[in-house]
Image (spheres, rainbow, N blue to C red):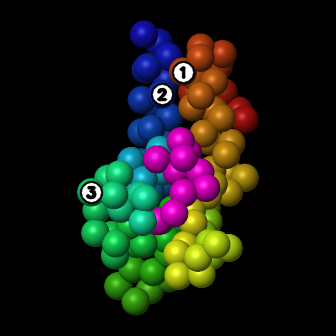
Amino acid sequence: MSELKNVITLYAELEKALPYPQLFPVFLLICDKEPIPLSDINKALNLEQFQVSRHVSALGKTYKSNREHHAGPDLVTTQEDPDNRTRKIAMLTKKGQKLRDKALEILKGKTHAKSKS
């Protein structure tokens, strides 16, 4: 049960850094399915396309809110789908990969949430 507590602690720490509380499910889906088209995130989480774009952007290096630019957590990046230029694909940045790996280690009982990565 301590692994679950450590994941909850990690989640709480991440939530503080995220501009919107709804971003964690988007981040988890990208962790699980990367690289993932934004349209697949839309379908999996039953969100509107504009919400997915906004959420993925808010997980990036910078995001726009109320016409102002803000520093984001730099966990996710996007690129054009090489097979379909009208689609964007989301994937983890190095920082996002480290956070995913840390969460997986906690779930496997190999580390504690407060340990340095």
Q: Amino acid at mark 1?
A: Leu
Residue 76 in view of the camera: no
Residue at image position (28%, 62%) is 47
Q: Residues within 10 Å of mark 3 (few under 14, many from 20)?
A: few
Quadrant containing the N terminus in the rendered view: top left
In this picture, is 77 found above or below 32? Answer: below
Q: Nearer the viewer, residue 90 or 87?
A: 87
Residue 3 is inside the magenta segment: no
Circle 2 residue: 7
Q: Amino acid at mark 2?
A: Val
Q: Nearer the viewer, mark 1 or mark 2?
A: 1
Circle 3 residue: 46
Comes first in the chain, label 1 or label 2: 2
Residue at image position (66%, 27%) is 115
Q: Residues within 10 Å of mark 1 (few under 14, many from 20)?
A: some
Q: Amino acid at mark 3?
A: Asn
Residue at image position (46%, 47%) is 29
Q: Are marks 3 and 1 in contact (CB under 8 Å)?
A: no
Range drawn in magenta: 29-38
Q: Nearer the viewer, mark 3 or mark 2?
A: 3
Residue at image position (57%, 66%) is 89
Image coordinates of residue 106 in percent, x first then y, are 58, 22
What separation in Å lies between label 3 and label 1 (alpha carbons)? 27 Å
Comes first in the chain, label 3 or label 2: 2
